[in-house]
């Protein structure tokens, strides 16, 4: 057997079989943009046929870094997570990094997603929107302390000198929404919560509770939805039947749409009888009837600031001072008003 037949396949072999340049093979395997889907599939098919595996450790030693950031994402089409993921990809490219994504949806936990990213070879990991991890029995996430990590909210077990925590606080958002409604004169504020296993939902509910407690207002029951308009509609039908309900903070705009419909069907006009505040400021929020008061997060600013801090950790250089939570912004429209006399 010749040396050529004994040696493992190289990127040159992949390029020859796929009919592309080595540079194109490199772009595909590094997850870089500017490669058509047809070419990408051809390169990956050639790599599979040849049994080609990159030596990621050798590549890292050669380059000093992988120039790739891993993102553990919920893999959701929901406005908030998808907007943050798009912003992260855009800002990473501007900083000269490719992005690898591992999803943490049903059946895949946060721990396994992070392990998958580290196995691919990344310089750092972003934990974008954590949910309870059913895979590791709820144990805290553990990552090598030498790996820089960016999280947009505190994660149990995730700490150390190379961990950056920044972002828009769901607690602050829930507090702002509730304080706005209380400030209009409502005796208390009801809440349609997101699914409890989402940490973002728990943060928003916590802000709601803290604002009620600070004002000495009673805390009503908080029905739980699943972020969808249908679940908001189901919760809204229950709330609409209770004459005590005059103000509702809904954990996202999609569920708020369902609440608005339920109230309209029950003959409880918004905001004449019930005021409603959402969260996210989705593009449709300003065009609802009535236009929805909501909490806006600047995902581009969140991604830009967080990745600037993360890049400083990767490159082991001084970064800009951490700003902590970037505040969410209340956008007041016509779905909120003082309670009817």
Image (spheres, rainbow, N blue to C red):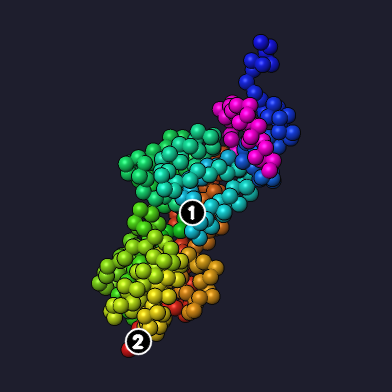
Whether residue 54 appears in magenta in the rendering, the answer is yes
Q: Is residue 20 left or right of residue 273?
A: right
Lower position in the chain sequence, tag 2 or tag 1: 1
Residue placed under numbered mark 1 in the picture: 76
Residue at image x 41%, y 80%?
Answer: 264
Count neighbours of disc 1 (C-alpha within 10 A) and say few if under 14, some if 14 to 19, many if 20 or more.
few
Residue placed under numbered mark 2 in the picture: 340
Q: Is residue 318 left or right of residue 22?
A: left
Q: Quadrant of residue 64?
A: top right
- Near-viewer residue (56 or 144): 56
Q: Is residue 30 visible?
A: yes
Residue at image x 29%, y 72%?
Answer: 215
Give the extent of the magenta segment: 38-67
Residue at image x 63%, y 29%?
Answer: 49
Where is 325 relative to 63, above or below? below
* Callout 1: SS: loop
Where is 192 relative to 43, above or below? below
State the mark number for residue 45.
Answer: none
Image quadrant holding the C terminus, namely bottom left
Q: Position of residue 63 (x, y in %)?
A: 62, 31
- Near-viewer residue (58 or 30): 30
Image quadrant holding the N terminus, namely top right
Q: Position of residue 315 (x, y in %)?
A: 56, 39
Question: Number of callouts in the render?
Answer: 2
Looking at the rendered image, the disc whose residue lies closer to the viewer, 2 or 1, is: 1
Query: What is the C-alpha distance between the residues marked 2 and 1?
Result: 39 Å
Residue at image x 54%, y 48%?
Answer: 307
- Near-viewer residue (258 or 256): 258
Q: Position of residue 76 (x, y in %)?
A: 48, 54
Whether residue 284 appears in magenta in the rendering, the answer is no
Residue sitting farthest toward the top: 1
């Amino acid at each position: 057997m010749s040396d050529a037949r004994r040696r493992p396949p190289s990127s040159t072999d992949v390029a020859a079989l796929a009919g592309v340049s080595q540079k194109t093979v490199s772009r595909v395997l590094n997850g870089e943009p500017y490669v058509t889907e047809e070419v990408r599939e051809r390169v990956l098919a050639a790599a599979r046929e040849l049994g080609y595996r990159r030596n990621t450790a050798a590549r890292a030693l050669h380059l000093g870094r992988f120039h790739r950031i891993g993102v553990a994402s919920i893999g959701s089409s929901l406005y908030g997570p998808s907007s943050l993921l798009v912003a992260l990809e855009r800002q990473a490219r501007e900083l000269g990094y490719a992005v690898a994504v591992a999803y943490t949806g049903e059946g895949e936990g946060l721990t396994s997603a992070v392990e998958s990213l580290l196995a691919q070879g990344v310089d750092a990991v972003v934990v974008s929107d954590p949910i309870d991890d059913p895979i590791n029995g709820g144990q805290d996430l553990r990552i090598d302390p030498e790996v820089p990590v960016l999280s947009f909210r505190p994660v149990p077990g995730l700490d150390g000198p190379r961990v950056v925590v920044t972002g828009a606080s769901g607690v602050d958002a829930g507090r702002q929404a509730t304080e706005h409604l209380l400030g209009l004169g409502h005796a208390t504020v009801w809440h349609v919560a997101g699914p409890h296993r989402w940490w973002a939902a728990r943060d928003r509910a916590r802000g709601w509770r803290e604002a009620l407690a600070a004002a000495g207002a009673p805390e009503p029951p908080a029905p739980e939805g699943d972020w969808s308009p249908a679940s908001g509609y189901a919760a809204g039908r229950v709330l609409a039947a209770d004459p005590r309900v005059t103000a509702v903070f809904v954990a996202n705009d999609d569920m708020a749409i369902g609440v608005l419909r339920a109230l309209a069907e029950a003959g409880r006009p918004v905001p004449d009888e019930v005021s409603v505040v959402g969260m996210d400021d989705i593009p449709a929020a300003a065009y609802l009837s009535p236009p929805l008061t909501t909490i806006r997060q600047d995902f581009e600013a969140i991604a830009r600031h967080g990745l600037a801090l993360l890049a400083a950790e990767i490159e082991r250089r001084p970064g800009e001072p951490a700003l902590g939570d970037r505040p969410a912004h209340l956008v007041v429209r016509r779905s909120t008003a003082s309670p009817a006399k």
